[in-house]
Amino acid sequence: MNIQAILESYAENIIQIMTPYGNGTGFIVDDLIVTNSHVVAGLKEVVISAKKIKRSIAKVVYDDAYFDLAFISFDFKKPKNQFILSTKSVQNGDTVVAIGHPYGLHYSATEGIVSKASRIYGELEYIQIDAAINPGNSGGPLLNTDGEVIGVNTFIILNSNNLGFALPYFYVDEALKSYKNLNSENIIKCSSCKNLIKENSIKNYYCPECGVKLEIAKLRAKGYKPTGSTKLLEEILGSLDVNVTLARRSQASWRIEHGTARIEINYYDNGIIIGDSKLCVIPKENIAQIYDFLLNENDKLSYLRFSINENFVYLSYIIIDSSLTLKEGKTAIERLFKKANEYDDILINKFGAIKQKRDEEDE
């Protein structure tokens, strides 16, 4: 199969994974989502989405820093065409396809060849490939031309020209079988003795088998806890009935859908907080009338302001972190939610502004 046929057949298996620390990719094998351990970042819960899975919270039930593998559990409907792990040996020069969400560009596929079928790195074998993989590809599947999974895209060598490495399918198969044989969730694999440890048997973050400290156990117990103005922003969003975990795009970025509007809230290193709603596109006609309307509305608004950037109309709330309070922040952001939705409709229906296009996977 070519890339287009593979994408059309298997796209439902590809999962986007989001945490406060970054984004990555996963893929469905049987009833689990497979990804890298470094993608889930030591968390018990992550946010996932896919073509037939709305943005949802899912559980990390297995974390294996040794293989850099993690398994995620979620009640999904199995795809029509399911991925299977290959049983064929990988050869130098084989054509391969890597699929993932690099830099948030959904369902990006790159084709290449196997540069070396067995490259030893540390104690493990990896498949070295020249197919381009980038941040966000981690945890995604490496496929052969039959659409079978031959590996998990795991890491690249920085500042190199397409030097990517995938964990081979046989390690994935070994980990899946070992995990399922336990018939239990919340399993951590000890990187030292390689035993699978039930999380509830761990005391003080030390492996009960060999005594090595399990950093993953410590991270999972700690979870993600925002601090300072980030914590205050999430308290404000929570007071507005926003599911903060689902809205969070990173430690300092949130996205909320409200009616036809989308609100992006970003907290920058210089202390500025900007709540933006990118509304519609200025049309070729009625430009003067739209400008007059926006200027008049700016005179009436408190907390919020209109602006235009690259022909898009924005409604924004801007504040410095030291001035943010729970009461005023709630008032301003609640107003942004309401007015963004209202003004988007007014500009489109009354002035003929053009509804913005979005990537279908961003909806």
Image: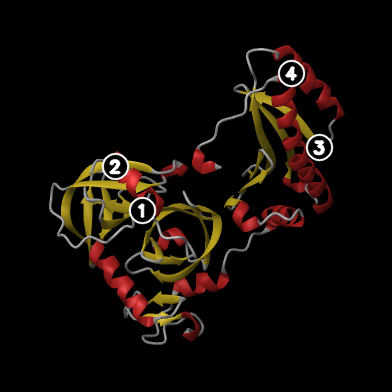
Q: Which corner quadrant holds the C terminus?
A: top right
- Viewer-nearest of discs 3 and 1: 1
What residue is disc 3 on? 303
Q: Residue at x 37, y 45 (%)?
A: 134
Q: Residue at x 66, y 59 (%)?
A: 227
Say whether residue 186 is left or right of residue 28: right
User: Quick one: label 1 or label 2, which is nearer the N terminus?
Assistant: 2
* Residue 259 drawn above or below residue 147: above
User: 198 above or below 269?
Assistant: below
- Asked if disc 4 and disc 2 are in contact, CB closer than 8 Å, the reply is no
Q: Amino acid at mark 3?
A: Tyr
State how far apart marks 4 and 1 are (Cα): 45 Å
- Quarter residue 197 falls in: bottom left
Residue under label 2, please give it: 5
Residue at horizontal 34 percent and vertical 44 percent from the top:
7
Q: Amino acid at mark 2?
A: Ala
Q: Mark 2 or mark 3: which comes first in sequence?
A: 2
